[in-house]
Image: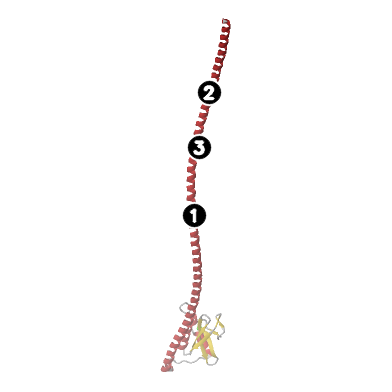
Amino acid sequence: MVEKKLIALSLICVVLSIGVIEAVMMLNQKETEMQMKTNQISGLENENLTLETQVSTLQANISSLQSETTSLSNEKTALENQVSSLQTEATTLENEKNTLETQVSTLQANISSLQTEVTSLENEVIESFNLGYSEGESEGYQVGYDEGYDQGVEEGPESGWYLRDPTYDEAIAFINSDKTNENEHTQDYVCYDFTADFDSNAFQVGYRCGFVYIEFTDSAHSIACFNTTDRGLIYIEPQNDEIVDIAVGQIYLDEIIVKMGIIW
Ligand SMILES: [Ca+2]
């Protein structure tokens, strides 16, 4: 009986021992598992920290990029405004250029018109001058002649004022002896002066001498003439002593004579 009890006790002990051993083993295993979990958790926490750091860094980067984006956007807006301003300026300048071109064109047309007017006026002045000069000379000559003629008539032949028409030979002889043709033609000594001097010299020797005025299209001229007793009227160019043939419609000195007359 005691033996059986011992055996039973022993068996119980064995069973208990096995149970304890198993329990210890299980405990160890759990501890190991827990340690592993703890290690895993620790690893994950580290990873989490690393990720958080990365997130923080990225957030900083994003913030920086956002600032940069804002800055660039502002710069872009500023540049756009500048471009717009420059475009406005360019348009204004283009308009100004067009206006100036129109003004220049108008002024050029005005200049051209004025030049035409000036040319026309110059021609008118030249024509008026020539005509006035011709008429003035002729009138002056006529007045002087009339006065001299009247004086000659009053004082009679003895006074030296008596005038007569020369013969052709006398006219030629006078032309050859007279020195008027040797005078120099200048701006102040022109055809009218040659004629006046030639006529005056003819009067001095008692010959009636005519002052011939000639009008061309846009200028005038004058020469002298004698009404010779034997061969009629002869025209003399007092600048070179040539006997010339002239009439309205004929060419003299490369110009057409449009009008002419004699003052005796
Ligand atoms: Ca002469």
Q: Amino acid at mark 1?
A: Ser
Q: Residues within 10 Å of mark 2 (few under 14, many from 20)?
A: few
Determine whether 179 is above or below 48 in the image. Answer: below
Which one is in front, 127 or 32?
A: 32
Residue 171 visible in the snapshot: yes
In the structure shown, which secondary structural element does the residue marked by tag 2 occupy?
helix
Q: Image quarter for residue 159?
A: bottom left
Residue 69, numbered label: none
Answer whether labels 1 and 3 touch (C-beta < 8 Å).
Answer: no
Give the labeled residue for mark 3.
Answer: 58
- Dot 2 or dot 3: first in sequence order is 2
Q: Amino acid at mark 2?
A: Met
Q: Report the label total.
A: 3
> Can you tell me whether the CB of the residue at mark 2 lies under 8 Å from the nearest atom of ligand 1?
no
Front tag of 2 and 3: 2
Q: Residue 170, image x and y in percent?
A: 51, 89
Query: For the N terminus, which image quadrant?
Result: top right
Q: Residues within 10 Å of mark 3 (few under 14, many from 20)?
A: few
Q: Residue 154, image x and y in percent?
A: 41, 94
Query: Mark 1 and mark 3: span between their CA atoms?
Result: 38 Å
Query: Mark 2 and mark 3: span between their CA atoms?
Result: 35 Å
Residue 84, numbered label: 1
Q: Residue 187, image x and y in percent?
A: 47, 77
Query: Mark 1 and mark 2: span between their CA atoms?
Result: 72 Å
Give the labeled residue for mark 2.
Answer: 34
Q: Amino acid at mark 3?
A: Leu
Front tag of 1 and 3: 3
- Dot 1 or dot 2: first in sequence order is 2
